[in-house]
């Protein structure tokens, strides 16, 4: 960033192009590989709109929408995590710190309970479940939980520690209520919730991708606006304010962006929040002292990790695929432990 | 006048840390703020910088109440170095100093030649040009302190508030910082208020001195008048004398180390 920066390692030149290449590679791999073996030539012709109906439907209606949904959700989770970790100065922050995933879990549970069970108590038909409404329902719950925690912490001066404590307390309560409801429910439909809870890209359609797209675009579009404040929010409030930052306003704005990104992503694919925790650490590790690289790397790696994680889950599980949430958690833990060893 | 405050009072909860503090600074004046630990020096500086709200009285920059100004408007006119500032360990010196330009560039304007010059000057003035690429974690305590001074300098504000700028520095850099303070005031007309513990440095560098005790202003005036008042000995509960070192030079406070009884083994 400055002419005075030493030339040691200089990862800045190749690391971002390398990460972008990785996005492309994982995207291509995810399109071409799958549980149904489709020859590369058929995949290509499906992509150009020719080829067999079966290949076309697998590629265009199943694989592509879930990959795109995953990429969007991955970028959102990773970015949300980075924003939250930065402004709370808490390296262990992820979107669940703001109660986003717990709130979403609760509203999704309530939503299924009311619409399905109360309206139509005898039905066992899974087809009638209003799955299309889960993303907005989850998102509203996530935003609401984030809002409650924000208001509680706002009264107490918005200190990062207060936010963390409020978040843990409210998150635990919401989570307990949701689990209580699920346990007391005891119906066959519990499967839908369980699948949603583990974070899954299974059966994600273009509708999900279209639901996420405006949030991804808006979130990325906000970056130029919050970029410099984000640098200053790494200091404590007194220092940031004496450098000329309106601390409360900027803190609240970044928090809002983070919650909106996380809540919409949780709504669409369930809580794959581990991505939000791990990817910013990976990006920081790769960027080293080149801080300006952390933000773009986080976004790009978010897309890569979710795409690859989902591919691994699809291939490893056979017809009963392993949900992406499980894969990222399993892959993420060793990475996390390795990275944390570097922290003094 | 660039910076004034009158009857400023600050409380933390029920504890009153500053009562009825008044100050009025001329342009280019250097003011030392002295007083025992906990006497309210940092509190006074923070209130002047608008970082904590006062319960009574107000601070004004060029006649405008600090409380009514935006943070960015304040930061253009006033730079503040906290007593123990914290920065992320992985931040480099250059990145820290760059933040000092935020009030000038704002959210969008890119760093121009003037900004880069200010940054280079701030690094140079604190002897940090060679360390610009190091992270703060890789610095000694004194180097880190100079990095913060440098960031405050980069703001190029007409008012500079420094909270114990020399406390972690070796004697060489202490003199250098005091010399820098002196040059800023005389060459650039910067108005400076600094909390400082070394009485002799305070006397040597400042035009006027404010002495605080338990949140109350005990003295406000020229160093010479302070040395003749007997207040230093009383406030700090020490025995000592002010001795004339050279004619026309400020007196030197020679403290008696009575509690050390060094009468051989
Ligand atoms: N954040 C705070 N909350 C509560 N009390 C505080 C706080 N900061 C300072 N105080 C109290 O206010 C009084 C003045 O503190 P201040 O930091 O202004 O002293 P100081 O003169 O700067 O001391 P030092 O020489 O040790 O830096 C002290 O009694 C201190 O205990
Ligand atoms: Mg102090």
Image (spheres, grey):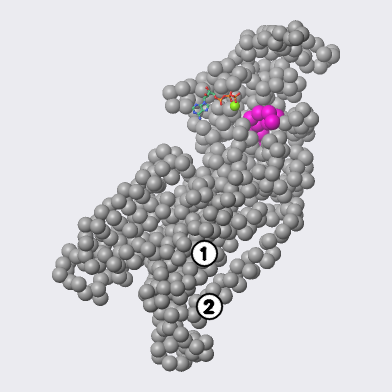
- In which quadrant will I find the C terminus of chain B? top right
Dot 2 falls on a residue whose secondary structure is helix
Between discs 2 and 1, the one toward the N terminus: 2
Asked if residue A237 is among those painted magenta in the image, a careful observer would answer no
Decide: few, some or many residues near mark 2? Use Cα within 10 Å; few <14, some 14-19, many ≥20. some
Q: Which residue is mark 1?
A: A302
Percent x, y of residue A337 = 53, 54
Q: Seen in the image, is B247 located left or right of residue A182?
A: right
Percent x, y of residue B101 = 65, 46
> Which residue: 52% across, 46% down?
A89
Percent x, y of residue A83 = 51, 54
Numbered badge on residue A29:
2
Q: Is disc 2 in contact with disc 1, using a CB cutoff of under 8 Å?
A: no
Numbered badge on residue B78:
none
Which one is nearer the viewer's eye here, B260 or B183?
Answer: B260
Which one is nearer the viewer's eye here, A310 or B25?
Answer: A310
* Residue reaching furthest to the left: A122
Percent x, y of residue B21 = 56, 21
Q: Provide the chain ID for the residue under circle 1.
A: A
> Which residue: 25% across, 67% down?
A189
Q: Quadrant of ligand 1?
A: top right
Which one is nearer the viewer's eye here, A200 or B103?
Answer: A200
Vertical position of residue B201 compared to residue B176: above or below: above
- In which quadrant will I find the N terminus of chain B? top right
Q: Marks 2 and 1: same chain? A: yes
Q: Provide the chain ID for the residue under circle 2.
A: A
Dot 1 falls on a residue whose secondary structure is helix
Asked if residue B167 is among those painted magenta in the image, a careful observer would answer yes
Q: Is residue A40 at least partly visible in the picture?
A: yes
What is the magenta range? B158-168
């Amino acid at each position: 960033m400055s002419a005075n920066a030493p030339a040691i390692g200089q990862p800045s030149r190749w690391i971002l192009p390398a990460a972008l290449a990785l996005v492309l590679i994982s995207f291509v791999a995810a399109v071409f590989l799958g549980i149904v073996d489709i020859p590369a030539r058929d995949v290509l012709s499906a992509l150009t709109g020719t080829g067999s109906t079966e290949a076309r439907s697998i590629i265009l209606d199943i694989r592509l929408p879930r990959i795109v949904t995953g990429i969007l959700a991955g970028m959102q989770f990773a970015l949300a995590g980075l924003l939250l970790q930065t402004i709370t100065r808490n390296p262990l922050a992820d979107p669940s710190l703001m109660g986003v995933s717990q709130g979403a879990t609760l509203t999704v549970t309530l939503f299924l309970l009311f619409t399905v069970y109360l309206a139509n108590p005898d039905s066992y038909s899974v087809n009638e479940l209003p799955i299309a409404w889960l993303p907005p329902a989850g998102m509203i719950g996530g935003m609401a939980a984030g809002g409650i925690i924000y208001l509680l912490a706002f009264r107490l001066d918005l200190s990062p520690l207060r936010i963390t404590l409020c978040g843990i307390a409210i998150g635990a309560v919401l989570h307990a209520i949701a689990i209580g409801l699920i346990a007391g429910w005891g119906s066959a439909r519990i499967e839908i919730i369980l699948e949603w809870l583990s974070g899954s890209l299974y059966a994600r359609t273009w509708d999900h991708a279209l639901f996420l797209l405006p949030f991804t675009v808006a979130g990325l579009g906000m970056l130029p606006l919050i970029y410099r404040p984000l640098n200053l929010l790494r200091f404590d409030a007194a220092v940031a304010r004496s450098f000329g930052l309106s601390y409360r306003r900027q803190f609240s704005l970044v928090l809002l962006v983070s919650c909106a990104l996380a809540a919409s992503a949780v709504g669409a694919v369930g809580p794959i929040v581990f991505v939000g925790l791990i990817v910013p650490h990976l990006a920081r590790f790769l960027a080293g002292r080149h801080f300006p690289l952390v933000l773009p790397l986080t976004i790009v790696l978010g897309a890569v990790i979710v795409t690859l994680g989902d591919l691994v889950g699809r291939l490893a599980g056979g017809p009963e695929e392993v949900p992406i949430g499980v894969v990222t958690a399993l892959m993420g833990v060793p990475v996390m432990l390795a990275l944390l060893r570097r922290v003094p | 006048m660039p910076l004034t405050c009158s009857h400023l009072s600050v409380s933390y909860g029920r504890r009153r840390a500053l009562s009825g503090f008044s100050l009025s600074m001329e342009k280019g004046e250097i003011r030392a703020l002295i007083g025992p630990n906990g006497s309210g020096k940092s509190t006074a500086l923070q209130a002047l910088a608008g970082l904590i709200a006062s319960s009574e009285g107000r601070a004004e920059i060029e006649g405008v109440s600090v409380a009514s100004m935006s943070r960015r408007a304040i930061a253009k006119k006033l730079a503040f170095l906290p007593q123990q500032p914290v920065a992320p360990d992985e931040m480099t010196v250059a990145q820290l100093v760059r933040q000092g330009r935020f009030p000038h560039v704002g959210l969008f304007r890119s760093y121009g030649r003037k900004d880069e010059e200010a940054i280079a000057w701030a690094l140079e003035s604190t002897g940090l040009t060679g360390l610009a690429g190091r992270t703060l974690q890789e610095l000694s305590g004194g180097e880190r302190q100079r990095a913060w001074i440098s960031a405050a300098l980069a703001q190029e504000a007409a008012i500079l508030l420094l909270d114990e700028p020399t406390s972690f520095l070796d004697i060489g850099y202490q003199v250098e910082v005091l010399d820098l303070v002196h040059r800023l005031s005389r060459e650039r007309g910067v108005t400076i208020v600094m909390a400082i513990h070394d009485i002799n440095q305070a006397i040597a560098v400042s035009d006027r001195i404010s002495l605080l005790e338990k949140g109350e202003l005990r003295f406000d005036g020229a160093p010479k008048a302070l040395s003749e008042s007997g207040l230093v000995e009383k406030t700090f509960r020490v025995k000592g004398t002010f001795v004339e070192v050279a004619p026309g030079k400020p007196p030197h406070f020679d403290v008696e180390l009575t509690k050390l009884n060094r009468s051989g083994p």
